Amino acid sequence: MELLAIAFKEGRKTPMLELDSADISTQTGVEHDVFGKPGPRQVTVLSKLQWLDTCNELNTSIPWIARRANLLIDGVRFNADSVGQYLKIGNVILEITGETNPCKNMEKEFPGLEAALMNDWRGGITCSVLKGGTVKKGDEVILSDQPA
């Protein structure tokens, strides 16, 4: 698995901004992200494979940042069994806490997107930060049952 992209939002009504690398901490999630407060939804992660499933269903190509997730990962499909597992990216450890539920704002991005994201955990996952550090595009991602 590989970390393909990193993004954050400075404010609630601001666009997603992409980064080549980012510090992720237990206090702020992805640096500068408005939603990075400690808790179960500190960092959001999207599967490239599941995003492509969504785009194919809608017969379109939509940039991944339309989903407003923090991290885009290739080589994995998330599901209910993912909850309680850990993502290791560089020296960062994230605990998967749940599914990211799509909201009505997805319809503003593309008609039908909200409904398409409701299937098969396509909206991604929520995570809390167990161990902070720096991540960069191209980093290997390991999905594990153990945090260390």
Image: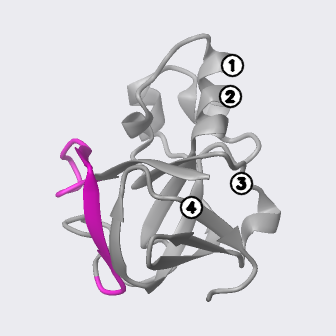
- Which amino acid, mark 4? Val
Task: In the rendered structure, find residue 141 and report the number of the disc placed on it.
Answer: 4
- On the rendered structure, is 44 left or right of 32? right
- The quarter of the picture where the C terminus appears is bottom right
- Which amino acid, mark 1? Glu
Residue at mark 4 to residue at mark 2: CA–CA distance: 21 Å
Residue extent of the magenta highlight: 8-27
Q: Is residue 23 above or below residue 125?
A: below
**Residue 60 % position (x, y):** 54, 12
Q: Which residue in the structure is indicated by mark 3?
A: 78
Q: Does label 3 or label 4 sit earlier along the sequence?
A: 3
Q: Does label 4 or label 2 sit earlier along the sequence?
A: 2
Q: Secondary structure at mark 4?
A: strand
Q: Which residue in the structure is indicated by mark 2?
A: 53
Q: Residue furthest top?
A: 59
Q: Does label 3 or label 2 sit earlier along the sequence?
A: 2
